[in-house]
């Protein structure tokens, strides 16, 4: 067994080894260049080797890396204040990942009702197609059996409902219900945006029944949909929100944001993290916001997204044997394929374009937010070549 692979065999990795990147490009060991429209699954919000992020990380690396939350960390106060000033939130808890941010969000909601004298109110309503992480609690929240199977009893307190069915939500609310958890756009679930009216109704139900609206903006947040956070498109505000991915620009960083009222039960000793909010992460997170909050940046995202979406719509019309529909918002776009999505992924990768598969036979396109219109058109040209070859194969068959 000495020659056996040392890693857990939990990933189906592509046989590609990248050694460096610049902007929207990645370069393999042998010098082959790939257009990266995966962005580390929506993580590399400012692309690869962004000079401002690199400088911020290097500068902090020369000072102090880790302290733990035994002490005050100025970077946390700075980033926390900037996040609260830019959002609905009053309070922030920093984590290392999206799953941890969701864990904090779930605990915050449950603890809120406990502190109000209602320990039995801990059930969270979730939706079919959701993905909220890989911890024991978050796989239960997502409710997808393929992630739950084999890990013992499902964590209690989560009820999965039909996507978009407001009557089912109202019928499911009981004295035990603490809150409603939803992604503004389902990522793993196939790039399905939540209809604005449905999101607004969820907000009204939470207000009516004294529930907390919890948003999972791990993938949709920090500019991905053309707004700082996707819920802005629906004109609603949550009580609690989990973020990660884009806020670190590639450095492990997440956060749970909440109103003062929603966070009122999270008193000293109720939650913690050894690494969460470490100085390195805070330096990078602040640097990401420096760029994303610049005047014109989010407008740039919206402008390029329009070019990209229009181009994808044209490809849908040209290649109906391959492309069934175009989904998503901003630079979080998906191609619902008529062919198996694995075939489409293989075809675009053969054109040196990287993308990410999702549920419902959808291919996700998640370019860095710094992508230019010209680079978007280059990506479209590569998808076009892939679709041409797949169409020929379908017709030949």
Image (cartoon, grey):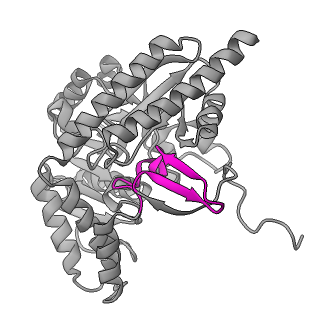
Q: Nearer the viewer, residue 224 or 52?
A: 52
User: Does the magenta run of residues contain 386?
Assistant: no
Q: Quadrant of residue 292?
A: bottom left
> On the rendered image, what quadrant is the C terminus found in?
top right
Q: Quadrant of residue 283?
A: bottom left
- Outermost residue to the bottom: 63
Q: Is residue 238 visible?
A: no
* Residue 167 position in % (x across, y down): 31, 17
The residue depicted at 13 percent of the width and 49 percent of the height is 88
Q: Nearer the viewer, residue 135 or 15?
A: 15
The residue depicted at 47 percent of the width and 16 percent of the height is 316
Position of 279 relative to 23 (above/below): below
User: Does the magenta run of residues contain 47?
Assistant: yes
The residue depicted at 23 percent of the width and 36 percent of the height is 302
Position of 179 relative to 24 (above/below): above
The residue depicted at 29 percent of the width and 43 percent of the height is 215
Left or right position of 225 against 313: left
Q: Nearer the viewer, residue 69 or 248?
A: 248
Left or right position of 383 against 79: right
* Residue 50 position in % (x across, y down): 34, 63
Q: How many discs appear?
A: 0
Left or right position of 211 against 391: left
Magenta range: 23-48
> On the rendered image, what quadrant is the N terminus found in?
bottom right
Q: Quadrant of residue 334?
A: top left
* Residue 121 position in % (x across, y down): 31, 45
Q: Is residue 32 visible?
A: yes
């Amino acid at each position: 067994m000495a020659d056996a692979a040392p890693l857990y065999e939990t990933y189906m990795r592509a046989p590609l080894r990248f050694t460096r990147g610049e902007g929207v490009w990645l370069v393999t060991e042998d010098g082959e260049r790939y257009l990266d429209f995966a962005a580390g699954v929506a993580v590399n919000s400012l692309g690869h080797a962004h000079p401002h992020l690199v400088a911020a990380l290097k500068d902090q690396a020369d000072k102090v890396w880790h302290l733990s939350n035994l002490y005050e960390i100025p970077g946390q106060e700075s980033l926390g204040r900037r996040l609260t000033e830019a959002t609905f939130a009053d309070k922030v808890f920093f984590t290392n990942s999206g799953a941890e941010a969701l864990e904090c969000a779930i605990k915050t909601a449950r603890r809120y009702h406990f502190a109000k004298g209602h320990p039995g109110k801990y059930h969270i309503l979730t939706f079919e197609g959701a993905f909220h992480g890989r911890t024991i609690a978050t796989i239960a929240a997502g409710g997808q059996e393929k992630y739950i199977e084999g890990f013992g009893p499902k964590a209690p307190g989560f009820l999965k409902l039909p996507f978009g069915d407001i009557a089912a939500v109202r019928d499911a609310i009981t004295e035990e219900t603490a809150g409603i958890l939803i992604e503004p756009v389902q990522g793993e679930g196939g790039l399905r945006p939540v209809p604005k009216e449905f999101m607004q109704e969820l907000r009204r139900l939470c207000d009516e029944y004294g529930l907390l609206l919890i948003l999972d903006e791990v993938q949709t947040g920090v500019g991905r949909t053309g707004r700082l956070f996707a819920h802005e498109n629906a004109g609603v505000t949550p009580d609690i929100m989990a973020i990660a991915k884009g806020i670190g620009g590639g450095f492990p960083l997440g956060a749970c944001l909440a109103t003062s009222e929603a966070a009122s039960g999270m008193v000293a000793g109720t939650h913690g993290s050894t690494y969460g909010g470490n100085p390195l992460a805070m330096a990078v997170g602040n640097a990401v916001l420096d760029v994303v909050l610049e005047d014109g940046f989010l407008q740039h995202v919206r402008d390029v997204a329009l070019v990209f979406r229009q181009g994808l719509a044209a490809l849908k019309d040209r290649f109906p044997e391959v492309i069934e529909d175009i989904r998503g918002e901003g630079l979080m776009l998906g191609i619902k394929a008529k062919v198996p999505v694995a075939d489409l992924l293989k075809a675009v990768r053969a054109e040196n374009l990287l993308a990410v598969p999702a549920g419902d036979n959808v291919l996700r396109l998640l370019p860095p937010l710094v992508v230019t219109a010209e680079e978007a058109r280059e990506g479209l040209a590569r998808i076009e070549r892939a679709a041409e070859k797949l169409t020929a194969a379908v017709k030949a068959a």
